[in-house]
Image: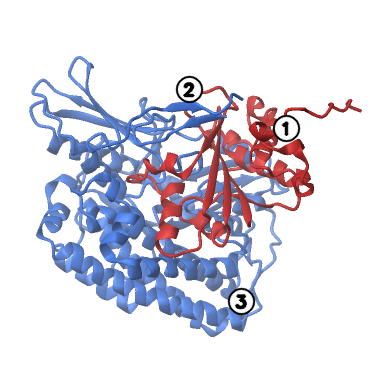
Chain colours: A red, B blue
Amino acid sequence: MKTIILGIGNPILSDDGVGIKIAQQIKERNPDLKVVETGGVGINLLDHVIGYDRLIIIDSIKTGDGTIGDIYKLDLDDLDASMDLTPSHGMNIATTLRLGHGLGYDTPAQIRIYAIEILDNTTFRESCTKEIERQIPTIAGKIMREEQLCAIHTLGSPLCQPLQNRPVSKPKPRRAR
Amino acid sequence: MKKITIDPITRLEGHGKIEIFLNEAGNCEKAYLQIPELRGFEQFSIGRAAEEMPRITTMICGVCPTAHHMAATKALDDLFKVEPTSAAKKIRELMYSAFQAEDHLLHFFFLGGPDFIVGPQAPARERNILGVIAKVGIDTGSKVIEVRKRLRNVLRIIGGKPVMPSAGLPGGVSKGINEEEKQTIIEAGEYAVEFCQFALEFFDDIVLKNKDYVELITGDTYQHRTYYMGLVDKNNKVNFYDGLIRVVDPNGKEFAKFKGQDYLDHIEERVEPWTYVKFSYLKQLGWKGFVDGEQSGVFRVAPLARLNAADGMATPLAQQAYEKMYSVLGGKPVHSTLAYHWARLVEALYASERLLELARDPEITSKDIINLPTETPREGVGVVEAPRGTLIHHYKTDDEGILTDVNLIVATQNNSAAINMSIERAAKSLIKDGEVPNGILNMIEMAFRAYDPCHACATHSLPGRMALDVNVYDTKRKLIKRLQKNSCTTSTSGDGVGEAVSNT
């Protein structure tokens, strides 16, 4: 199955860039994956995903209710309800993908969106806030495990299976060197 | 991990907000648009090498990166006191024309058009591109996608990548165009010219033949008699890439014409205590408040303003479309905000024709694409017409070309006073004797959308668009009504955060 991982965000707007930074970490840990970082919005996202079977999007969100670094796991259906008017230019992801499908493009059948609760997306700076920055490796790990993206999966190891599918008897943890 | 459902009434931070205050009689007294503002771009830039700016500024906005790229590149020409070669100027303008055409067409069909194509009274959930396609058919929908693809390919050929181009260097461009690429660009231009003619005919059929729509365009709700600003060439024709900034008064008479470098003599900025958004106004007239007319310094920019500020279009088909628009709408200048949509299509046709002209120019494949800078940098200003209006970049550096001061006047800021006035006008015409109809949200949004404002467009957080809330207060500042997106139509429940898959 052809999989693409899209990290979405603005790399110079503080936590807005968290999707891009997580995508970079995922690529570092498993260079075989197809990972794309993008600052594109709306319809431009369609350019990246045509021809893939499975799409994993990593983006930021600011619900204001969650704890910074919370990971929300969304399906396209979760975003469908926001397919209303767009007062600003950005067409949302759900509309974009439905549009591509409606026009007969080969858009991914499997779509998963991970949204990270962030603190600040209005200050220009290249780094994320420290609250987000220190969680990036962990979040990347959690998403990789959830989506079975670890390099070790290609060897069929049970180590990186999603939590609920893991064998009951865990292997002994190795001592850190 | 948590589960969340985002629907139109889910509160996400970063919403735009419109606050409406009623008077004793229950009519709208004042309306204010509040938008979250991005901070710190100036500090972010200071201390960096000036030549980084054409690439950094593309990240300010995910929608019009090419406009910032080009304004920054032109500011570098001025900063390093180097005149680009003739071929380089043509390549830049060609690239810029492709960008303008694509952006305008996308806006018409995807964002602004749904109001007209699907209809202002249609349920909000149908007023989007999917609703447009349901109405116009898949063939037309596919053509929109095809023209966009071809125009973006032109940006890719010249700029490396369409989202964050890297073509612009002080004194020229980084890469020329070869014969094969030239052919591809010519084909894209031909396709775009044909498509824009189709789009104008389509506008004619759908909008102009509908009496209600024409009344909506020409009615009082969306009228403002303001000044208009735009770049013009030496014949006073609309130009997106270069020229002098021309301002006309509400009667269409030339009020000022000046070089980009002199912008501070003509444009002043103002802050209001209730918003972070700055308001531009004409310095010579001064700030008289959020009012239109000849005495007020409020001016407008972007498609309709550019057409009003110029004497015509520099290409034949666009000139015909220009003449038709003014003849139908009763002569120049046109003050109706909703005519921005029509003007946008006229401009898309001009951009496509200009793209084709430049692509056919024998000099476009010249290898003479850069003049190397030799002067010590000090200060530079670059001006272009972004799709959303006049865009100004102003940099100062030390002798090494390290930035010491940066000032950007973005297009939407030039329109921000007028946007606020349009919202207030819509509120005043719709709220009567304390009755706030639900449809007001859409009517206000229509005013807002005509300008295609670029508020908060640098952020990419989900759900990928900015929502608007409308709050209405009585004379005692008591909230009497809150309208949120889609609250006037059937919406799914606003559960917000729901099932927790697993905690982080």
SS for callout 1: loop
The answer to whether residue A70 is left or right of residue B482 is right
> Which residue is located at x 36 percent, y 65 percent?
B141
Residue flagged by tag 3: what amino acid is it? Ile
Label 3 – label 2 distance at C-alpha: 52 Å
SS for callout 3: loop
Disc assigned to residue A167: 1
- Residue at the spot of label 2: A65
Residue flagged by tag 1: what amino acid is it? Pro
Give the total of numbered labels.
3
User: Residue B13, percent across and down?
Assistant: 44, 29
The image quarter containing residue B158 is bottom right
- Subunit bearing disc 1: A
The answer to whether residue A38 is left or right of residue A92 is right
User: Residue B57, percent across and down?
Assistant: 57, 49
User: Residue A38, percent across and down?
Assistant: 59, 50
The image quarter containing residue A1 is bottom right
SS for callout 2: loop
Q: Nearer the viewer, mark 1 or mark 2?
A: 1
Circle 3 Cα neighbour tier, 10 Å, few/some/many (<14 / 14–19 / ≥20): many
Residue flagged by tag 2: what amino acid is it? Asp
Disc assigned to residue B21: none
Label 1 – label 2 distance at C-alpha: 34 Å
Judge whether residue B284 can be spotted in this image: yes
- Residue at the spot of label 3: B177
Confirm whether circles 1 and 3 share one chain.
no
